[in-house]
Image: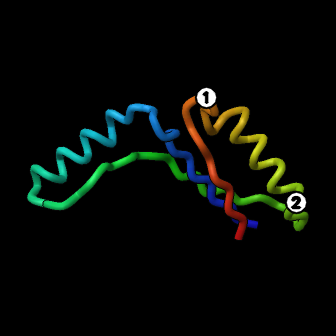
Amino acid sequence: MKARITVTLKNGVLDPQGKAIEHALSGLGFDGVGQVRQGKVFDIEITGTDKAKAEADLKAMCDKLLANTVIENYAVEIA
């Protein structure tokens, strides 16, 4: 099974890297770009066929390592 985990900052948390990207895009002549929020994507391959167990394991990975749940949200997609 293949999974994709997307980690983003929660709303209200300052995103200095996203702000820098926003300014850089403007400086490159890309007008009309609104707020930019930066995040992380993890593509993970999991052995086995139990989708429920895989989802539980992936969420545990996020809670323990991949995301700082105090300031970040995450979404798990299994293909």
Residue 59 horizontal/vertical position (percent): 75, 46
Q: Which residue is drawn at 24% across and 39% down?
A: 20
Q: Which amino acid does label 1 sit on?
A: Val
Hey, which residue is sitting farthest bottom in the picture?
79
Residue 61 horizontal/vertical position (percent): 73, 41
Q: Residues within 10 Å of mark 2 (few under 14, many from 20)?
A: few
Pointer 1 residue: 70
Residue 42 or residue 47, whichever sits in front: 42
Residue 51 or residue 29, whichever sits in front: 29
Residue 59 or residue 36, whichever sits in front: 36
Compute the Cα span from label 2 to label 1. 25 Å
Residue 45 horizontal/vertical position (percent): 71, 60
Q: Quadrant of residue 64?
A: top right
Q: Residue at x 28, y 40 (%)?
A: 19
Question: Left or right: 49 with respect to 62?
Answer: right
Q: Which amino acid does label 2 sit on?
A: Ala
Q: Residue at x 51, y 45 (%)?
A: 8
Q: Mark 2 touching mark 1, by CB under 8 A?
A: no
Pointer 2 residue: 52
Where, quadrant-wise, is the N terminus in this rendering?
A: bottom right
Residue 79 horizontal/vertical position (percent): 70, 71
- Tell me the element at label 1: loop
Q: Nearer the viewer, mark 2 or mark 1?
A: 1
Q: Residues within 10 Å of mark 1 (few under 14, many from 20)?
A: few
Does 26 appear above or below 50?
above
Question: Left or right: 36 with respect to 64?
Answer: left
